[in-house]
Image (tube, rainbow, N blue to C red):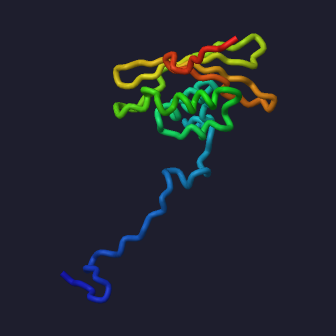
Amino acid sequence: MNSDTATGYTAGTRPRTPRPRTAPGGPAGTRPRGDAGTHPRTPPRALPPHTVFAERLLAVLSGERPVHWMLGHTVGEAYEQLVRLAPATPLRSLGPRPVLRRCSVQLDPHRTTMEAFASIATGPRVRAMAFRLELGTDQRWRCAAVELDGLGVTPRHA
């Protein structure tokens, strides 16, 4: 075997040159779109507000996120309810991570308030969560009340 001591290559081989990382058909953005067998890219579907809030509330109640993460997303008593609920909730157990199974909503006739209810699975155990969303003057939904298996219920005094 002949070896070039200066380069370290054997005779009959050449140094490997890096190939450009492009997909077949040319660099990204230069391939034809349309009827050529490709599908146009569709934007990701946005989740409905009640599902987004259910995920956010679950993250706080399970201890994955701090309560103050919901500061700009709550109105009225909801933040105080979260402060009371979060440390004592059974969703903070050391078992499997809680997962949102289902979230449904009931809109009021004026479409300014949503009453949402969700089922949360923690291993074989299923828990219930209910919350109310209110549409602000800035057209943003905010959580106005939270209950978890009856833990968020506080008696009202007349």
Q: Quadrant of residue 39?
A: top right
Point 49% across, 17% down: residue:
149
Q: Quadrant of residue 123?
A: top left
Q: Nearer the viewer, residue 9 or 108?
A: 108
Quadrant showing the N terminus: bottom left
Q: Position of residue 91 (x, y in %)?
A: 43, 28
Q: Position of residue 32 (x, y in %)?
A: 61, 45
In the rendered view, would you say 54 is above or below 43? above
Give left or right: position of 121 versus 153: left
Q: Residue furthest right?
A: 137
Point 55% across, 21% down: residue:
152
Point 75% across, 19% down: residue:
112
Q: Is any part of residue 77 visible from this angle?
A: yes
Q: Residue furthest left?
A: 1
Q: Position of residue 86 (x, y in %)?
A: 51, 32
Q: Is any part of residue 103 visible from this angle?
A: no
Q: Nearer the viewer, residue 139 or 57?
A: 57
Q: Position of residue 97 (x, y in %)?
A: 40, 32
Quadrant showing the C terminus: top right
In the rendered view, would you say 37 is above or below 10? above
Q: How many marks?
A: 0
Q: Residue furthest front?
A: 158
Q: Residue furthest bottom?
A: 6
Point 35% across, 75% down: residue:
15
Give left or right: position of 30 versus 119: right
Q: Nearer the viewer, residue 154 or 105?
A: 154
